[in-house]
Each structure stands twice: as C-alpha cells, then as structure tokens.
Amino acid sequence: MLERAKLATSGDGYQHIEYARWADDLVILIDEHSKWDWLEKAVYRRLQEELAKLKVAINTDKTRIIDLRKGETFSFLGFDYRRGKIKQGKWGVQKTPRMKARTNLLRKLKEVCRSHQSQPIDRVIYLINSILRGWANYFRVGNSARCFGYVKDWVEKKIRRNLMRSRKLQGFGWEKWNRKWLYQSLGLFEDYRIRYYTPKVSSSR
C-alpha cells in the first residue's frame, strides 16, 4: 500500500512520501510542504484499513504524529531523529544515539568492570572491547560524534580507576599512564570514527 502511495504521488519527479520498517516498528515520512498535508491523514487512514484486514491494531500509546519543523523528535531503532543544520548550513535530519542506548551501554560496561575487578586488566579490556565494538559499529552513522566522545572518556576513566584500585591507590593515574599506553599497549578499543554511507556507482561498457 505504501509503495503504491509513493508511486501515485511522484508524478512531478519528486518523492513526497517515504517509510522505514523493521519488524513491527514503522515510520512514515511526509513532505513538509503544506500542499501535502492531506497525504498525512490519507495515509494514516489507509494504514489503519490495511492493518484491520490483517486483524492487527495500531499501538496508539506508541504511535505519534510529529512535525520536525516545530523542533519535535521521534525515536526509531535506537536513534533520536530531529531537524537541524547539516552540511553547508542546510536543513536536514540529524540522528543521534538515544540517551537510553548510551545508559544501557555504560551499565553493561560498569557491570563487567565490577564483576571482574580481581581479574587481570587484559581480561577486562577483552570483555569490554567486544561490547564497545558491537555498539560503536551500530551507532557510527549520522551525528554520533558527541555521544562517542562521552563514551570514550567514560571508558578511559573506568579503566584507569580499575588499574588504580588493583594497586590499592586512589585517583585515575593520569601521571602514571598516558592515553597512548592505554590504547596501544593495553589494546583498549578506540575506533570511534563516524562512517558515512557512500553509494556505489556502477559503470557499464
């Protein structure tokens, strides 16, 4: 139904409706121009009709209609989406990791550090690296740099505290170990680079 709606409204060569679905989560996006306001109501009504045929009800508690132009946000698959300035000062959609996603990550890392406090530091780093690698690979798109910077600093301080506590010392050991030693000698995960999607261009002869 949504594919047909996309085709029916693209007669002028532009896309005025788009959607993204994962399992039973769905986001529908409508062109912000006022001439397409009717499309929002029409698509929502048709969606309800189609789901009724499948005997599936929309979860009204989780369903929202929001306007990005008014500073409203929505969440989808661990990201928060909002309107903001992107490259070259143009308006676009920014996506950042949800605060809940970051909190859950730090909770997992804290538990690993706590439960393995008596273990060798290389064992602790091996365990947290696997968690960090998976988390960073998922969120290393969009506008995650600030969140990544926070996570990196938090992890570094946590490792420093573990090192100091294992020696029955206080503080973070800023003068004992420099950052290079933590990442190169201990092998602490440090790949927090943001990667941008580059479409593949195929050539034909």
Image (cartoon, helix red, strand yellow):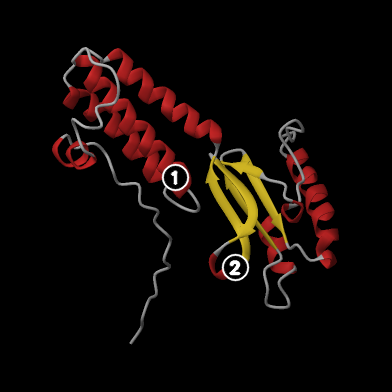
Q: Which residue is drawn at the image coordinates 37% and 45% (left, top)?
A: 137
Spot occupied by residue 126 in the image (x, y as percentages of width and height): 22, 29
Q: Is residue 205 left or right of residue 15?
A: left
For numbered disc 2, what is the local secondary structure?
Answer: helix
Q: Gap between marks 1 and 2, in whole Å? A: 23 Å
Label 1 belongs to which residue? 139
Kindly indicate the quadrant of the structure image that contains residue 6: bottom right
Between circles 1 and 2, the one closer to the viewer is 2
Label 2 belongs to which residue? 89
Q: Nearer the viewer, residue 165 or 189?
A: 165
Residue 165 position (above or below residue 97): above
Q: Earlier in the sequence, mark 1 or mark 2?
A: 2
Q: Which residue is drawn at the image coordinates 84% and 60% (left, top)?
A: 37
Kindly indicate the quadrant of the structure image that contains residue 80: top right
Count the numbered circles shown.
2
Q: Is residue 56 left or right of residue 21?
A: right
Q: Nearer the viewer, residue 154 or 116?
A: 154
Q: Is residue 9 left or right of residue 190?
A: right
Q: Is residue 202 left or right of residue 101?
A: left
- What amino acid is labelled 2 in the image? Gly
For numbered disc 1, what is the local secondary structure?
Answer: helix
Q: Which residue is drawn at the image coordinates 21% and 32% (left, top)?
A: 175
Spot occupied by residue 117 in the image (x, y as percentages of width and height): 25, 14
Spot occupied by residue 64 in the image (x, y as percentages of width and height): 75, 41
- Is residue 1 something that shows in the picture? no
CB under 8 Å between discs 1 and 2: no
